[in-house]
Amino acid sequence: AVVSTQSTGVSLKVALGHGGGSRAVNHANCTVFLISILFLVCNGSFPLSFLVLSIFEVKETFPGYPFFQMAKFTFPLLNAALFPTIIILRKPSLRKRYKGYVIEALKAAVALSCLKTHSHTRGYIPL
């Protein structure tokens, strides 16, 4: 966490134009900054929710209880899902490579949706 915070500070300094690096270095620093922020937000939610639930002895009747329960497990999973997404979106060669996969997946999803919609209009019950 300390290394992540330090790299976030350096990346923020460079991203704001206070660093003297090249365009490639700035791009890499911005990527590290985005990943660090994602890590801090997503993985920081687990200890925070644990502290709130244990220190304040939050009961199930507390209005925010479901959020804290969900945050313990969902945010780290969100970090795991978004980390490769950031890498793919930040690197042009990966973005170009996966663009075709995403387009094909969306086409398949639309086709499947159209099939289900079409079967509903004929009175069929989908499986």
Image: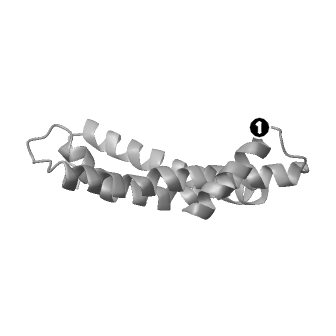
Asked if residue 60 shows in the view, the reply is yes
- Tell me which residue sits at (91%, 50%) in the image: 22
Asked if residue 89 shows in the view, the reply is no
Q: In screen coordinates, is 45 left or right of 17? A: left
From the top left corner, tell me how far across and down residue 63 is, in percent.
16, 37
**Which quarter of the picture shows residue 121?**
top left
Q: Which residue is mark 1?
A: 16
**Quarter of the image with the C terminus in it:** bottom left
The residue lying toward the viewer, choosing from 26 and 127, is 26
Q: How is the image coloured?
A: one colour
Q: In screen coordinates, is 73 left or right of 85? A: left
Q: In screen coordinates, is 66 left or right of 104? A: left
- Tell me which residue sits at (32%, 59%) in the image: 73
**Quarter of the image with the N terminus in it:** bottom right
Q: Relative to 93, does residue 63 appear above or below in the rendering?
A: above
Q: Relative to 127, does residue 120 appear above or below in the rendering?
A: above
Q: Pick out the residue farthest to the front.
A: 55
For the residue labelled by badge 1, is the local secondary structure a helix, a strand or a loop? loop
At label 1, the amino acid type is Leu
From the top left corner, tell me how far across and down residue 62 is, in percent.
13, 40
From the top left corner, tell me how far across and down residue 46 is, in percent.
35, 57
Q: In screen coordinates, is 17 left or right of 119? A: right
Q: Residues within 10 Å of mark 1 (few under 14, many from 20)?
A: few
The residue lying toward the viewer, choosing from 49 and 80, is 49
Tag count in the figure?
1
From the top left corner, tell me how far across and down residue 92 is, in percent.
77, 54
- Tell me which residue sits at (40%, 42%) in the image: 114
